Image (spheres, grey):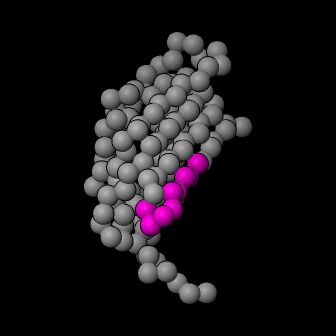
């Protein structure tokens, strides 16, 4: 197997220290309802070239005890503006941080990254509490 020239660029991504995502107490934890968040102008950096990557990120979740505080989530997403990160790692990291902060019933995060080199990348990850 030939190794990619990207090898090793993301070895510490799981330990990336991101800003805290704040939450507030849901007054309807016994109700099933969906909250959708759209980030149409998300940016991060390609870890190899240093060039910006642009994406539309969507988050759809069913809250339990907590809901996401939007300003802190905005600050969380802005953090990635200067971070070199693969698209796949970004969505995985974002989902893990989101689940840790809010402990939702379910959450689905999708990133649709702008075309680069003739390829559009869409990455989706879902979580369902058992």
Looking at the image, is 122 positioned above or below residue 28?
A: below
Residue 57's place in the image compared with 67, above or below, is: below
At x 63% / y 31%, what residue is drawn?
Answer: 105
Question: Toward the viewer: 62 or 48?
Answer: 48
Query: In the image shown, does 77 or 97 lie closer to the viewer?
Result: 77
Tell me: residue 92, above or below residue 102.
Answer: below
Q: Position of residue 93 (x, y in %)?
A: 48, 51
Main secondary-structure element of the magenta-colored stretch: strand
Verify whether residue 81 appears in magenta.
no
Q: Is residue 122 magenta?
A: yes
Q: Position of residue 118 (x, y in %)?
A: 48, 64
Residue beneath the point at 67% across and 38% down:
128
Pick the front one: 67 or 56: 56
Q: Residue at x 60, y 48 (%)?
A: 125
Whether residue 104 can be seen here: no
Q: Which residues are magenta?
A: 116-124
Which percent across, then down, holds residue 8?
Answer: 43, 76
Residue 2 seen in render: yes
Q: Residue at image x 67%, y 37%?
A: 129
């Amino acid at each position: 197997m030939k190794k990619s020239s990207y090898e090793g660029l993301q070895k510490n991504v799981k330990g990336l220290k991101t800003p805290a995502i704040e939450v507030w107490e849901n007054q309807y934890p016994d109700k099933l309802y969906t909250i959708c968040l759209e980030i149409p102008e998300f940016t991060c950096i390609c870890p190899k070239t240093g060039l910006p990557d642009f994406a539309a990120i969507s988050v759809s979740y069913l809250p339990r005890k907590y809901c996401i505080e939007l300003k802190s989530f905005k600050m969380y997403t802005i953090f990635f503006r200067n971070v070199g990160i693969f698209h796949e790692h970004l969505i995985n990291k974002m989902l893990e941080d989101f689940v840790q902060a809010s402990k939702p019933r379910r959450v689905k995060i999708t990133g649709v990254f702008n075309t680069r080199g003739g390829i559009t990348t869409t990455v989706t990850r879902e979580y369902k509490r058992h």
